[in-house]
Amino acid sequence: MALPKYNRILLKLSGEAMAGEGKFGVDVHSADDLAKTVKSIYDLGVEIAIVIGAGNLWRGKDGLDHGMDRTTADHMGMLATVMNALALADALKRIGIDPRVQTAIEMRAVAEPYIRGRAIRHLEKGRVVILGAGTGNPYFTTDTAAALRAMEIDAELLVKATKVDGVYDSDPKKDPNAKRFDTISYIDALNLGLRALDGTALTLCMENEMPIVVLNLWQADSLKNTVLGETAGTLITY
């Protein structure tokens, strides 16, 4: 069996990955597919932490557009990420993986509170740790939460899973001449405003030398090939 290049990763998933074709809510078949993808690298011995978004359940911008308070809208989004985390944990458990959900906002009846040392111990014991509720603070995206947690748990790679096979200089869905980058520096990604991750997350990764791979999670074996050292998307580094 091939040995992974990375022993511990942080996988950032969008909430839309849980929605299926309906693009809203939690689709159990999509959760099952995600769990199988996670298992493909779990079986290689990779330690996996996951941060998941909430776009399938709530978009704070919709609330803001109707005059909602930003803090309220962001807290609603954090709670929605916990729903996604619980659904994914259930799907992982059903295929033989022992998951743990930890949340930045305490809700002990449904999940553990996020404690860095405990999260690392879970990883060391072969458990997949799903980190919900973002950073626990408004005004920060789940991209930033993923970058922060990647640093805290000593991950070797942050993987941003999308529906696009990397970072482009323009929207490939709108521009047929969009150029795809195999590798790009943090500073160039920031200066070009490429939105691979939000600016706060990119800056945090740059300052702490955390490599990022942006890939299409639905491209066959893209995640598996990446952890084996064959980057399937765009590598963002120095």
Image (cartoon, rainbow, N blue to C red):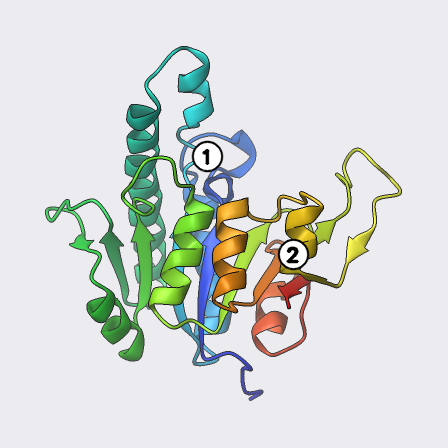
Tell me the quadrant of the picture where the C terminus can be found: bottom right
Q: What is the residue that sits farthest to the right in this orientation? A: 177
Q: Residue at x 75, y 49 (%)?
A: 168
Mark 2 crowdedness (10 Å alpha carbons): few <14, some 14-19, many ≥20 = some
Percent x, y of residue 209: 52, 69
Q: Residue at x 41, y 43 (%)?
A: 28
Label drawn at residue 55 = 1
The image quadrant that residue 100 belongs to is: bottom left
Percent x, y of residue 91: 36, 54
Q: Is residue 211 visible?
A: yes
Q: What's the residue type where badge 2 is placed?
A: Ile
Which residue is label 2 attached to?
187
- For discs 2 and 1, the disc positioned in front in the rendered view: 2
Name the N-terminal-most of marks 2 and 1: 1
Q: What's the residue type where badge 1 is placed?
A: Gly
Mark 1 crowdedness (10 Å alpha carbons): few <14, some 14-19, many ≥20 = many
Q: Residue at x 67, y 43 (%)?
A: 193
Percent x, y of residue 182: 75, 63
Percent x, y of residue 195: 62, 43
Looking at the rendered structure, the secondary structure element under dot 2 is: helix
* Label 2 to label 1: alpha-carbon separation: 27 Å
Left or right: where 173 falls relative to 232: right
The image quadrant that residue 236 belongs to is: bottom right
Left or right: where 136 falls relative to 165: left
Decide: is 154 above or below 149. below
Decide: is 147 above or below 63. below
Looking at the rendered structure, the secondary structure element under dot 1 is: loop
